[in-house]
């Protein structure tokens, strides 16, 4: 089941998963170094969540399908550039009109697959399209130029909102 939790709700689940809730009524925990225990848990929780978004299998996440109504599309040199929403961490899949298959994904804009797309003779074709994700933008370059609508499935991180599958609490460490 896909979960959409606020920071408070996520912290409550995090405490339960890590064995800090429910606290025993006969034990008292006191710290003298001035550290807030919940802030330590939030730091650990955010580190885990960030790694989950970047590395976990797609079935443990809550990816969004971004259609043409949520994408800004413009033509580039031999490609179509798609501006993704702020906070896009990872692209799961890309399909487009005129392509015979889903795109092979590259998340390294200076990698070998991305460099091959710059030259017209080594560029991808409709039978084996390529999508190059640049997280700094975040942008996506599509090769070859699609003839129709573009649909992108991506993981988008939002401030103070944790979106994941319930199985992620057991299935990702």
Image: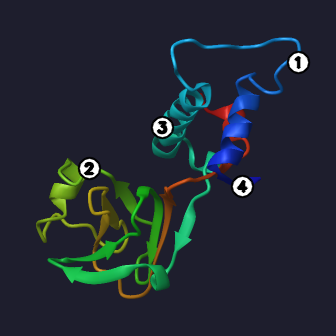
Residue placed under numbered mark 3 in the picture? 51
Mark 2 and mark 1 lie on one chain; the one further toward the N terminus is 1
Q: CA distance from mark 3 to mark 4?
A: 18 Å
Q: Nearer the viewer, mark 3 or mark 1?
A: 1
Q: Judge by depth and name the residue closer to the eye, 111 or 73.
A: 73
Task: Report the mark closest to the observer, 2 or 3.
Answer: 3
Residue 59: give x, y in percent of width and height.
Answer: 64, 49
Q: Secondary structure at mark 3?
A: helix
Asked whether the beta carbons under mark 3 and mark 4 sit within 8 Å of each other, the answer is no
Structural crowding at the residue carrying mark 3, measured as other residues with C-alpha within 10 Å and reported as few (<14), some (14–19) or many (≥20):
few
Using residue 4 as the reference point, say whether residue 141 is left or right of it. Answer: left
SS of the residue at dot 2? loop
Q: Residue at coordinates 48% horizontally, 85% vertically from top-left?
A: 69
Left or right: where 114 falls relative to 41 = left
Q: Quadrant of residue 143?
A: bottom left
Around disc 4, counting alpha carbons within 10 Å, would you say few (fewer than 14), some (14 to 19), or many (20 or more)?
Answer: some
Disc 2: which residue = 108
**Which tag, 2 or 4, sits closer to the chain's start?**
4
Mark 2 and mark 3: span between their CA atoms?
18 Å
Q: CA distance from mark 3 to mark 1?
A: 34 Å
Residue identified by numbered label 1: 25
79 relative to 154, above or below: below
Question: Where does residue 79 sit, x and y in percent of width and height?
Answer: 23, 76
Q: Position of residue 14 (x, y in %)?
A: 68, 34
Q: Nearer the viewer, mark 2 or mark 1?
A: 1
Point 54% across, 27% down: residue:
40
**Mark 4 sits on what residue?**
2
Identify which residue, 127 or 156, lies in the foreground. 156
Q: CA distance from mark 2 to mark 1?
A: 52 Å
């Amino acid at each position: 089941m896909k979960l959409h939790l606020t920071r408070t709700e996520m912290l409550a689940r995090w405490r339960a998963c890590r064995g800090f809730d429910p606290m025993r009524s006969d034990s008292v925990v006191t710290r003298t170094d001035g550290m807030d225990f919940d802030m330590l848990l939030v730091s650990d929780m955010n580190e885990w969540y960030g790694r989950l978004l970047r590395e976990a299998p797609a079935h443990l996440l809550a990816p969004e399908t971004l259609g043409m109504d949520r994408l800004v599309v413009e033509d580039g040199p031999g490609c179509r550039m798609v501006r993704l929403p702020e906070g896009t961490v990872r692209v799961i899949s890309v399909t487009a009109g005129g392509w015979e298959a889903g795109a092979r994904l590259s998340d390294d804009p200076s990698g070998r697959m991305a460099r091959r797309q710059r030259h017209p003779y080594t560029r991808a074709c409709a039978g084996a399209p390529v999508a190059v994700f640049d997280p700094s933008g975040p942008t996506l370059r599509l090769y070859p130029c699609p003839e129709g609508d573009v649909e992108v499935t991506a993981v988008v991180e939002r401030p103070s909102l944790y979106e994941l599958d319930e199985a992620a609490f057991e299935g990702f460490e």
